[in-house]
Structure formats: C-alpha cells, structure tokens
Image (cartoon, rainbow, N blue to C red):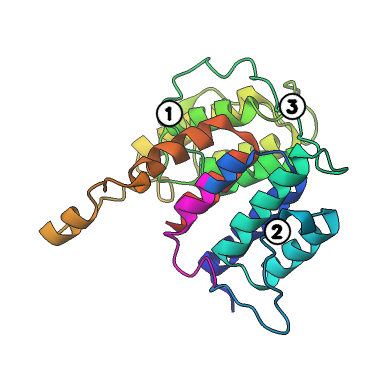
Amino acid sequence: MMDDKFKTRQTLRQNLLEQLARNELDGDKIRQIIAVSVAIPDFFEQYQVNEIYDAIEPDELDWNASYFDRQRKLAQLNFAEQRINHLIDVREYLIRNGIAGFAKAPLAGPIEGTNTMNMQGYLPGANLAKMVEQGTTSQARSALINELEDNRLDDAEIGRAIAWAQARVANLFVGYEENSLAGKMNNDPAQWDTDYYDLQTSYLNSNFAKIRFEHLITVRNSLRQRRVKGFERIIIKPKPQSQQARAASRPHSDSSSSQPGFLRVALMAGGALAVLAALVISLL
C-alpha cells in the first residue's frame, strides 16, 4: 500500500512534468523548484540509458516538438534530475524559436484584495494550495473546511487561509441565504455545542457564505476555550536539537541557503508555483 509521502512525491513529479508542457512558468522558476527538490529523499532517480531509455541529445539541431514529447515520456519512466533539466533546456529553445505549441503563456496580473490583512509569513497547506490551483471551486471549499477542522491552526491562521483562497478562487463564497438545507445561525454562545457546530457545518456545505464560515470559526474558538472534546488546540512543539543537529541545520554558503526564502515567496505568488512549493515543503 502506498504511503502518503510516496503519493505526494508522485504528485509533485506529475506537476513538474505538466508545467513543462503548459509553459506557464519560466524555466528559472522550475529550476529553483528542482534545486530545492534535490533534498527530498528518493525524489529523483539515477539517470539511465539503455535499450528502453534513450540518451538525451545535446545537439540543438535535433531538438523539436516531437523530441520534447519523447523525452518527456521518458522522464516519466526515468525521473532523473538530468532529464528534467534537459527538458527545460529544450523547452526554452523551442520557445525562443517560436515553435508551435510552445508560446509563452501570459502571467496573471495581481489580484485585488490580497492586502486586506497581514499575510506575512503565511504558508498555505499543501492540500489547500493544490485544490485552489488545480481543483474546482467545490474542492477549494472542501479544502478550506479541512483547514477549519485542523486543530493545529488558530483563528488567525484560518482567517489568512480564507483570504489567501478568496484572492485566487472566483466565486469562492456565495451570498448568505436561509432555506430548508441551510438554517439560521444562533448567536447565543450558551447554546453552542458539538451538535450545533456539526449542524452549522452542514449548513455551510449547502450555503457557502463567508459569514457562515466566520461564524463557525467563532463557534470553534468558543468550544476550544471551554475545552470541549475534539476542539482542543493541538500544539506541536519542535524537538530539541542536539549540538550536532544544530550545526547541520545552519545555512551553507552555497545556493541552498536561499531555498527556504524562495519557497515562501513562491507560496505567496500563488498559482502553479505555489502548488509546487507547497508540495516540496510537505516532503522536506
């Protein structure tokens, strides 16, 4: 049975190969993702050349769309760092030469409303980032509810998750309404309990209004403060490091020292780059 790490590695590999075909991200950004991914255990395979795996062709005269497609299929079978970097080189060559199917995709402009709250240092979870970028609106909503159910997150983190997703998903929230599937909200904290929380969650699924989501945050916080079972805050304390481990974790003088900063910037950028960065962070 495949474990979660294996599935995430496969997802990251597939995302990288898809981005090479979509031409949405420039080569430098993908190279940076690859440079960080080198630290992921068992992520890249050893470069192989045999009767099944053709060697990469260094001569640009042999680079065309068919060659790119063939090498991309080979990379799926032999996911070697050398093959992925070669695919970037080929893609950039085809873009420069205006080969059909390799036109650079226009970058999306900045989205209004992203500065309505302090987002400094916010890193969306891998699932939220993936669902916002690749999933449907309903999947993005489900990912947000999963954030709400995560007892490791406090109210401020949930609020920033909402702001981050809302800035990237059109029509994430709908207008508030009451009907047979979405009843009223009760503003009396004395009547809030587990059953009420579950009921309001079902209402939210039927009427995904922002005011309902914010109400659930308030209810959750009240139940947490009253130490209701299932709502206790989970705080994960970092394990104390030995002197040897602390020394190993110090930044080196090479390019790897800038990698964490790049991942943070990538997550804040949103889009496909944020998805890749979130997947990498979950594997490091």
Q: Nearer the viewer, residue 127 or 234?
A: 127
Q: How would you rate the neighbour count of disc 1 (Cα within 10 Å): few for under 14, some for 14-19, many for 20 or more?
A: few
Q: Nearer the viewer, residue 215 or 42?
A: 42
* Amino acid beneath label 1: Ala
* Amino acid beneath label 2: Asp
Give the residue pinned by disc 3: 170
Residue 59's disc is 2
Measured along the vertical axis of the image, is residue 215 above or below residue 275? Answer: above
Name the secondary structure under disc 3.
Answer: loop
Residue drawn at point x = 67 percent, y = 35 percent: 204
Residue drawn at point x = 65 percent, y = 40 percent: 272
Q: Distance from label 2 to label 3 (Cα)?
A: 45 Å
Of the image marks 2 and 3, the number of the one nearer the N terminus: 2
* Amino acid beneath label 3: Ala
Give the residue pinned by disc 1: 156
Q: Is residue 4 left or right of residue 49?
A: left
Q: Distance from label 3 to label 1 (Cα)?
A: 22 Å
Q: Quadrant location of the N terminus?
A: bottom right
Can you see residue 144?
A: no
Q: Nearer the viewer, residue 44 or 158?
A: 44
Q: Nearer the viewer, mark 3 or mark 1?
A: 3
Q: Distance from label 2 to label 1 (Cα)?
A: 54 Å
